[in-house]
Amino acid sequence: MAVITFREALNQALMEEMERDDQVFLMGEEVGQYHGAYKVSQGLMDKFGEHRVIDSPITENSFVGLGIGAANVGMRPVIEVMTFNFAILSLDQMVNNAAKLRYMSGGQFSCPMVLRGPNGAGGSLAAQHSQALEQQYVHIPGLKVIMPSTPGDAKGLLKAAIRDPDPVVFMESEKLYNYKDEVPEDEDYVLPIGKAHVKHAGTDVTIVTYGRMWTHAVKPALERLEGEEGISVEVIDPRTLRPLDLDAILKSVAKTHRMVLVEESWPQASVGAWICEQVYAKGFDLLDAPIERLSHLDVPMPYARNLEDEIIPSPEDVVEAVKKVCYKR
Amino acid sequence: MASAVNLLQLSPTMTEGTLVKWLVKEGDAVTSGQAIAEIETDKAVMEQESFEDGTVLKILVNAGARMPVGSLMMVTGEKGEDIASILASASAPAAPEPEPAKKEAPAAAKPAPAPAAAPAAKPVAPPPAASPAAKAANGASGGRVAASPLARKMAQDAGIELSDLAGSGPSGRIVKSDIEAALAAPRAAASSPSWVVSGEVEELPVSGMRQTIARRLIESKTTVPHFQLTVEVRGERLLEAVAQIKELDADAKVTVTHFLIKAMASAAMRHRAIRSQWAGNTMRVLPSAHITVAVAIEDGLVTPVIRDAHTKGVMQLSAELRDLAKRARDRKLTMEDMSGGVQTLSNLGMFGIHQFAAIINPPESSILAVGAMEDRPVVEKGAVVPGKVFTLTMSCDHRVIDGAVGAQYLGDLKRSLENPALMML
């Protein structure tokens, strides 16, 4: 397997899908001549030209809407937002148009588009540019939401998202773009949407996590948990937040009887809150301890780096939470 | 403001108590410092006092109930106050006799339109199988046993009564490991003996004192490294001294025991190791020789302490010991009466016991076991002659007292006992 960055994996996925299907095009701020604010679209304009890699003005509501319209007439647009903080401006397009058209047209229209870009904290980007906003999309019937945690998942799932017949929100992380890991060198590596992945197999406790929290908080805690604490940890990454692979989570909890949920984003009405509620409702008799949930502290993100570190779940927080659900204190 | 009256810790080792008798009833006025109830602790029957001035609004526990320290027993406050929040927030202890449902919160004072908070507060009778101890330990609140959903399911599948178990989770929650432990443990009640029993096996309740004896002696025997030193003591001069005192005062109630206490205390003042106690990272040396005396009472044993025994004469020691023993039998010893000793005297000589090894009474570091004064052949100047002899066995905590140190003390003690005149020095 090749070891490449998250950024390169996304680039490969875009490259391969644009080669495979000439209806696929990329549009967003600085995606063309500048090769993307985070260089995800490196070399795409050179290869596919200005008609398939389109630099948009700074008008999220307009170019997201344009992507939706193009999808309605059969194209496969990939719309890049510089960050999901800015995609708030285009929320009306996503919620009222992308998510609703198939339903309201009685199936006459579909919207096979991808809205993608970085989500969550990026390191001293302050309150307006550090938000993890996946819950805004997971809330909406009619949308699919993917939040990959590794380069391999990013590649396989972005290709699946581009091919999906419905609008897919694909959420990356500024902090993950440089993260290197193995990516299968299959000629056409596509992962199924809606399938969780066992990131680490174990027997004593289930950690459910997704996106950046896997490498930031959970993975660094594993050695201590399994070594010093002697707790065997199973890590489930849903990868797709909507539709959620609840069966995979319940299957793991049926084995471990304990669960810790680790997410970026705020705790109130979050995706993690929903997942925990589903486990309580459908796996009530499986649980030997209340679920522990780790998320951002419930405050706007400060600019100061040391405070940002305090806000985001840490490996130490994960160790404490796991010990708590295992009644080891 | 209505206030909760909880069971106080009335002795340093008390973890639960039995309500012997209420000294107040609902509607009574109470003042701060007034005795409100008699509580049997692990050591004695003691009175708990009120901390507040006010009216007794609600009594939640019946006489005979055993409950953990901190359990809500009573609510005081202003007449007619709403006490629902106190009742709801407290974990109601188990009532041994289910009360008739009539005994509701005194809602009369407040014409509440709906029976809102009352149900949560009603003390609910425990299921018939519940042992009070398990009940106290599984976070049972108003009859609801706290258990994780998994533990509940496992118990149901295995046919285990949750209320029989003690929970190890937070606030006594029963968790998976508790059920697994219960499944692994032999099911005493379920298994019938394979041999034929004539007559009925009795199951007796265990008193607070008996539980304390069990807990403290297991703790001592399993955590204190004991070793024993034994010495034979000639008793002729000791008996002579006792006889002399009685000759002068026929009513004097002096026995060998009182000389033993005096001699132990005086020797302990000369050997600081005997006054030392293991305190984790430090060694605690007590300044005076308070001697603890094991006193057998009905269904158990208590250990009152004679203060500064080295400074007292045998007549005074005799009087003090008689007073302590009487109060022990009446269960009137206080916490103060039973703490601070350096060494315990346990004498079974009057029962004809030749010699025995006693278990140390922590935090003390030694205990002296005294056997009966016997006629034994002894060798004097190469000839066997009849002698009065008794055997002393000292159990020592090896963390504090080493063999040679203990032997020196015991030699010193033997010398005093064989030469009572030395006690005058």
Image (cartoon, coloured by chain):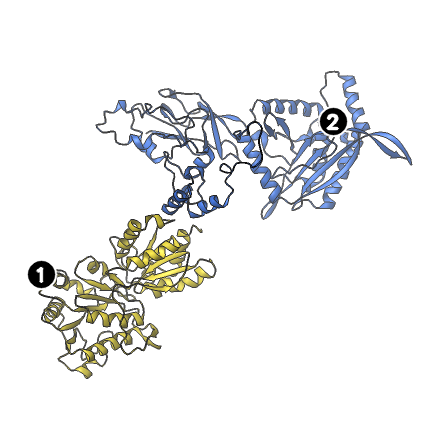
Q: In which quarter of the image is residue A12?
A: bottom left
Quadrant that contains the C terminus of chain B: top right
The amino acid beneath tag 2 is Val
Chain letter of mark 2 equals B
Quadrant that contains the N terminus of chain B: top left
Q: How many labels, in total?
A: 2
Q: How far apart are marks 2 and 1 (CA)?
A: 106 Å
Query: Which class describes the residues within 10 Å of circle 1: few (<14), some (14-19), or many (20+)?
Result: few
The answer to whether residue A6 is seen in the rendering is: yes
Q: Residue furthest top?
A: B250
The answer to whether residue A262 is seen in the rendering is: no
Residue B381 placement, left or right of A8: right
Give the colour of chain B. blue
Up-down relation of residue B220 to residue B98 (above or below):
below
Up-down relation of residue B372 to residue B218 (above or below):
above
Chain letter of mark 1 equals A
Query: Do the residues at pointers 2 and 1 share their chain?
Result: no
Q: Who is closer to the viewer here, B63 or B242? A: B63
The amino acid beneath tag 1 is Gly
Expressed as whole percent of the image width and height from the top left, the position of residue A267 reads 28, 54
Residue B15 placement, left or right of B225: left
Q: Quadrant of residue A58?
A: bottom left
User: Which residue corresponds to mark 2?
Assistant: B256
Expressed as whole percent of the image width and height from the top left, the position of residue B270 reads 72, 38
Residue B69 placement, left or right of B344: left
Residue B119 placement, left or right of A112: right
> Of helix, strand and loop, which one carries label 2?
helix
Please name which of the two marks, 2 or 1, marks the residue nearer to the observer: 1
Query: Which class describes the residues within 10 Å of circle 2: few (<14), some (14-19), or many (20+)?
Result: some
Expressed as whole percent of the image width and height from the top left, the position of residue B367 reads 67, 37
Q: Which residue is drawn at 39% across and 20% down?
A: B25
- Mark identifier at residue A106: 1
